[in-house]
Image (cartoon, rainbow, N blue to C red):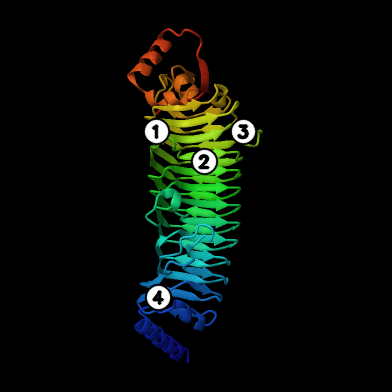
Amino acid sequence: MKRLWLMLCLLAGCLVSTLGYALPPLQLFVDITPPGGVLTLPAGSYAGPVVIRRPIIIDGRGEVTVDGEGGGTVVTVLADGVTIRGLHLTNSGNSHDQVDAALLLAANDALVENNRMDVVLFGIHIRQSNGNVVRNNRIESRAEAPSLRGEGIRVWYSSDNLMEGNHITQVRDVVFTNSSDNRFIGNTIENSRIGMELIFSPDNEIAENTLIRNTTGIVLIYSNGVVIRENRLLNMPDATSSALAVKESSQVRLEANDIVRCAVGLTANSPTDPENIIYLINNHFAYNDVAMYFYGEKGGHIIHGNRFTGNIIPIAVSAASSARDNDWRGNAWDTYEGFDRDLDGTGDTPHNIYLYSDRLWMDRPMARFFRASPVLEMVDFIERLAPFSMPDLILSDPSPRMH
């Protein structure tokens, strides 16, 4: 009986397609699939939008395209326990207000895997939806200016979701808003504006991802207890770029990340209270214009075991005390000039960084253009050779690690 209904729907879809030169509507096939059923569609293109109101499995096997025909969200999931697999979702609406997307998850415990989404405004919108798995999807927005695109993945008031192995390119951002306890693992984000932005989203884990050629990498705003580990943040050279930016977020742990060839590796404000600190452990900052920039009047962050290689400026500050009061220990500095006579792997003398000519462009951002120029290098050399006044100490690492 089920096969008969499927055949009738196929015939009806083909008739509509033949008479009206339109794609067969996927909604017909979805509506006749019973709860718990598997909808395996013949290869081809089908018309959306589609709304799924019962727990079913849709398997396109990589051979099925769902065309939203430029109106609204292509596929909307309103039932728990739905699986969307192997579909090509394309041609959503273009409304930012309505959040027109390839896929809207407004239910729980969905599995979304091995899909391709392109020519859509937003990619996947997870809205008040928990316990979903979004895996191995490729997401691409429209060919517009970055600010006119939508988010590749938008997570809003949602928890306990796993997003892993997705390839996200040419979108605006990936945004978590008021969403906690999610895991974002092993994804690639490239050629976008902000790689990831977390706003009022505590206790999330961001691990083993690659963010490359974005304007900005990962931004935390009022998001406490976030773990960012083993990520690769590469090639973000724009003057306003920062691979990592942390503002008003406490107990954030940044561990074993590679930050390479960025304008600024880390931007962080001073902690407003003793609990509002960042743990920077075993990260590698290499070939950045500025490895770390701290702003505010006082420090307090824990910075241990990091490696600094080939950065033009290792540490920049808005005030001398911004970095000095951080807990620096066991970091490896390529500018360290001391010795390790007892061969214990730790320098015999502290590594101190003073503020010389760098103060010019730190105090006057317009002078940043001349950073590392022969003129400033000469000024810096003269100040080190015969300082007119005692330079400010930016930081002191009492036990620098040898290379």
Q: Which residue is mark 3?
A: 271
* Residue type, mark 2 in image: Leu
| Mark count | 4
Q: Which residue is mark 2?
A: 254
Q: Residues within 10 Å of mark 4 (few under 14, many from 20)?
A: many
- Residue drawn at 57 percent across, 61 percent down: 127
Q: Which residue is mark 1?
A: 288
The tag earlier along the polypeptide, 4 or 3, is 4
- Residue drawn at 42 percent across, 39 percent down: 259
Name the foreground residue: 328 vs 390: 390
- Which of the two marks, 4 or 2, is nearer to us in this view? 4
Say whether residue 225 is left or right of residue 169: right
Pick the quarter of the image with the C terminus: top left
- What x and y, as percent, mark residue 284? 43, 36
- Which of the two marks, 2 or 1, is nearer to us in this view? 1
Q: CA distance from mark 4 to mark 3?
A: 54 Å
Image quadrant assignment for residue 106: bottom right
Q: CA distance from mark 3 to mark 2?
A: 15 Å
Q: Which residue is mark 4?
A: 46
Q: Is residue 148 visible?
A: yes
* Residue type, mark 3 in image: Pro
Name the foreground residue: 361 vs 298: 361
Say whether residue 357 is left or right of residue 18: right
User: Quick check: 183 above or below 245?
Assistant: below
The tag earlier along the polypeptide, 4 or 2, is 4
Q: CA distance from mark 4 to mark 2?
A: 45 Å
Q: CA distance from mark 1 to mark 4?
A: 48 Å
Q: Residues within 10 Å of mark 2 (few under 14, many from 20)?
A: many
- Residue drawn at 44 percent across, 38 percent down: 241
Name the foreground residue: 212 vs 251: 212
- Residue drawn at 42 percent across, 78 percent down: 40
